Image (cartoon, grey):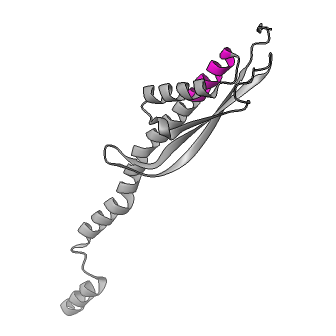
Amino acid sequence: MTQWRRRRRGACGDERGFVAAELALGVGLLLFPVALLVLTLPTWSERQASGRAIAREVARTVAVEGTCDRVAANDVVRTMAGNLGLDPADVSVVLNCMSGSALPRGGSLTASVTVVIPAVTIPTIAQVGQRHWTTSHTEAIDPYRSFEP
């Protein structure tokens, strides 16, 4: 009976040495990708919030000015991107008006801002991949504005 038990124990397999392999695979295949995702999600949210704020300020600045001024819009983008910790080259703006034209009384102005969002961010080490995210803000032009003749 003892031989049969010895043979039976050998047939089930020896479990020594598998913990190290399972731990390495668990860390490599589960923990590391989840940690990268956790480190990256705040960057996505931050870039989206920054894009919305920049679009809002560009639309308001140009609407209050009364003329479609792309230079002023780009100045606002550069200033706000710097203040929000973004590279100004990662942000672009498009206005829905002809450059230099007067904005119509009671009309609207839409500023569309595109922000580059890194796909994966490892803080202080690297950013891998990128995608572009676009948001827009529409600002009403003052219907009671007086224009010079």
Foreground: 74 or 31?
Answer: 74
**Residue 16 sits inside the magenta stretch:** no
Furthest-front residue in this view: 149
Which residue is at 63% across, 28% downward? 70
Q: How many marks?
A: 0
In screen coordinates, is 144 left or right of 80? right
Q: Position of residue 35 (x, y in %)?
A: 37, 50
In the image, residue 80 sits, relative to residue 65, either above or below, namely: below
Quadrant of the image for the N terminus? bottom left
In screen coordinates, is 30 left or right of 59? left
Q: Quadrant of residue 108?
A: top right
Q: Position of residue 62 (x, y in %)?
A: 65, 21
In the image, residue 109 sits, relative to residue 126, either above or below, namely: above
Q: Main secondary structure of the magenta part?
A: helix
Quadrant of the image for the C terminus? top right
Which residue is at 44% across, 29% downward? 82
Furthest-left residue in this view: 2
Foreground: 49 or 138?
Answer: 138
- The span picked out in magenta is 53-65
In the image, residue 144 sits, relative to residue 130, either above or below, namely: above
In screen coordinates, is 114 left or right of 102? left
Which residue is at 70% across, 20% downward? 67
Q: Position of residue 41 (x, y in %)?
A: 46, 43
Foreground: 101 or 66?
Answer: 101
In screen coordinates, is 118 left or right of 3? right
Which residue is at 19% across, 89% downward? 2
Q: Quadrant of residue 133?
A: top right
Q: Position of residue 4 (x, y in %)?
A: 24, 91
Q: Quadrant of residue 22?
A: bottom left
